Image: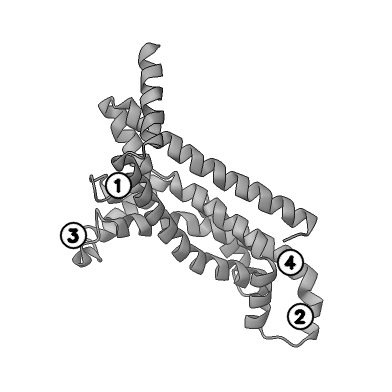
Amino acid sequence: MSTIWEALTQAFLLVIRLDADLVEISLRSLQVTLSALLIASCIALPIGAILAVRRFPFRRVTIAILNALMGLPPVVVGLIVYVLLSRSGPFGVFGLLFTPTAMIVAQVIIIVPLISSLAHQALRELWAEYHDLLISLNTTKRQRMAALLWDGRRALLTAVLAGFGRAIGEVGAIMIVGGNIDHATRVLTTAIALETGKGDFALALALGFVLIAMAILVNLAIHALSRTEREGRW
């Protein structure tokens, strides 16, 4: 019991003192995750708008596939990206394996279906409300999608935050394609796994506190946005 309390005390001290390793790992996690989130949002939000506004063959199949990919095992994504970026793979010439770029690619693949599906659900309801108005104004499909994306920004921000929460806590795919290399690709989740295996519980707990704090902040933001959405306030 004393060992546990000692580790907890040391972990709190590491957080309070802004330990160099803790700060470096945390900042790298944010860099990778925010980069992946930006790229994924640029891909996923237009997909959600297209699925809400346009009618095309196999639309329902596409929606079903997106919903199914929300539960795609991250380790499978990591394996696929590893094969594609390995020296014998089609993109091996770029030398991206075991770099932050490979980690970003894996996270983008993981969270695009999630953000797309949530965005589609939100914009579908908005499209049902605005359909007659936008049609009567003789708007183009591009203008309709732009209007939905703007008016549905609160719900879409909730979808983006959900993607952030999924990405920041990812470990399987990141471990495979990043390699957990010190001062290069080590992030919060992979560092926690490593330090726990090494028996350095103080640093592992400190990293865990940071990760939990991020998750709580994201969930509080989602709750606040969802509440204002229901109350019709910005």
Mark in the foreground, 3 or 4: 4
- State whether residue 206 is above or below residue 84: above
What is the three-letter code of the residue carrying label 3? Arg
Q: Residue at x 77, y 54 (%)?
A: 230
Mark 2 and mark 3 lie on one chain; the one further toward the N terminus is: 3
In the image, 44: left or right of 126? Answer: left
Mark 1 and mark 2 lie on one chain; the one further toward the N terminus is: 2
Q: Secondary structure at mark 2?
A: helix
Q: Secondary structure at mark 4?
A: helix
Which quadrant would residue 95 be assigned to in this image?
bottom left
Mark 4 and mark 1 lie on one chain; the one further toward the N terminus is: 4
Mark 3 and mark 1 lie on one chain; the one further toward the N terminus is: 3
What quarter of the picture does the C terminus occupy? bottom right
Residue 54 appears in the picture as rendered: no
Pointer 1 local density, CA inside 10 Å: few below 14, some 14–19, many at least 20 = many
Residue 153 lies, in percent from the top left, at 65, 65
Q: Nearer the viewer, residue 91 or 183?
A: 183
Find the distance from the CA under tag 4 to the CA under tag 1: 40 Å
Q: Which residue is mark 1?
A: 176
Q: Which residue is mark 3?
A: 87
Residue 130 lies, in percent from the top left, at 77, 73
Q: Secondary structure at mark 3?
A: loop
Which quadrant would residue 159 be assigned to in this image?
bottom right
What quarter of the picture does the N terminus occupy? top left
Q: Which residue is mark 2?
A: 134
